[in-house]
Image: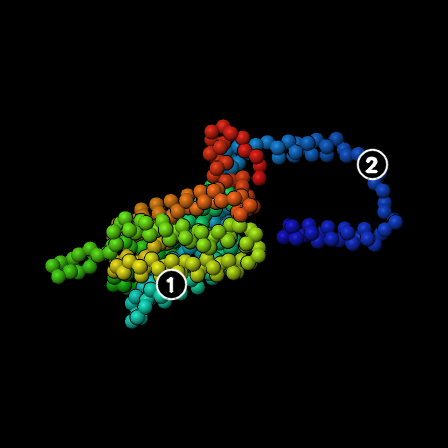
Amino acid sequence: MAAANSGLQLQAVDDEESQTVGTKIQPLSSTPSRRTKNWTVDQEHKEQLSPTLTDVLGLDEFLTLDVYRASVGELLGTAVLVFMLDTIVISTFESDIKMPNLVLSVLAAVIITILLLAVHPVSGGHINPIISFSAALVGLISMSRALVYIVAQCAGAILGALALRAVVSSAIEQDFSLGGCTITIVAPGPDGPITIGLETAQAFWLEIICSFIFLFASIWMAYDHRQAKQLGHVLVFIVVGVVLGLLVFVSSTVTAQKGYVGAGINPARCIGPAIVRGGHLWDGHWVFWAGPAIACVAFYLYTKIIPRQHHRSKAYDHDFYNVVKIMFGSEVKRG
């Protein structure tokens, strides 16, 4: 709004000048005052100073109320996401559908797209620790803001899981584990209970691969302001939703293992039901955090390897490489 208002003001000034050609009033003095000159020098000196570690990490944002206000959007958005997605997981597998994975993927794509459009004006539309962490590494947001967002997302996931627990029966809660992220489950066998599902190593690799594809194939468009401007936010969010839906379908069908619900690709969505429901949801839970974290680092390294002109983010001051340089005593030029 400020930019728009300033643009309107500039246009108004131009119109006034065009209407008063030849009758311009000359200023009394073109020499700036001493106070104005000193302020200008101080501003130029401040801009020339190399950013400190506090600046790059954005530690001052911990004291900024706007960050916490924006995080409310992340909290509510993630709460709705967990409630809706876990409800879809339960309903698709509970109902008699021939291809529940396909229905689940399509509905997940629609829900994610809608929620991204709803939360974007408030906080940028993350509702996923993968997006917040990778955005901090690339430099679009500070690491401090990313931490606040991730905490809000996890809190929202807990609220969403609590809301789901309040509306489903205890039998459904037990049978479907509140729609949480599972690698294995305990099922009745001919000689007693048996553990079925996917091996931890396989789930770990699937989490890394799917999370990287998610960043590479969709979030990349949102990070590059040139593509985001050309395509528009609506189309970008549709692509994000479709890519996530495809990854859910692929990861849940390629293994063909009962007990494994597919790649989480959202650690907050996984931790919500795990905290509320507990039990076997904690088995291998680290996979749903470690896998995406490695994928985020791999994606960040990819953005540093490719030619600079092929990836232009608006805010490089928070780039993680700048953090490393300052920690080792190197100077960093401002964006």
Q: Tell me: residue 80, above or below residue 224.
A: below
Question: Is residue 273 in view?
Answer: no
Q: Depth check: 253 or 160 in front? A: 253
Image x and y of residue 42, in percent: 66, 32
Question: What residue is shown with label 2?
Answer: 29
Q: Left or right: where does residue 99 sit relative to residue 232?
A: left
Q: Tell me: residue 264, above or below residue 90.
A: above
The residue furthest top is 329
The residue furthest left is 191
Residue 333 image-quadrant placement: top right
Residue ID at (11%, 59%)? 191
Question: What residue is shown with label 1?
Answer: 105
Residue ID at (35%, 59%)? 250
Q: Which mark is residue 138?
A: none
Image x and y of residue 253, in percent: 31, 61
SS of the residue under disc 1: helix
Q: Amino acid at mark 2?
A: Ser
Image x and y of residue 228, in percent: 54, 54
Question: Is residue 82 in view?
Answer: yes
Image x and y of residue 294, in percent: 38, 44
Q: Amino acid at mark 1?
A: Ser
Q: Tell me: residue 60, above or below residue 166.
A: above
SS of the residue under disc 2: loop
Residue ID at (81%, 51%)? 17
Q: Depth check: 308 or 73 in front? A: 308
Quadrant in the picture for the C terminus: top right
Tell how many labels. 2
The residue furthest front is 307
Residue ID at (66%, 33%)? 44
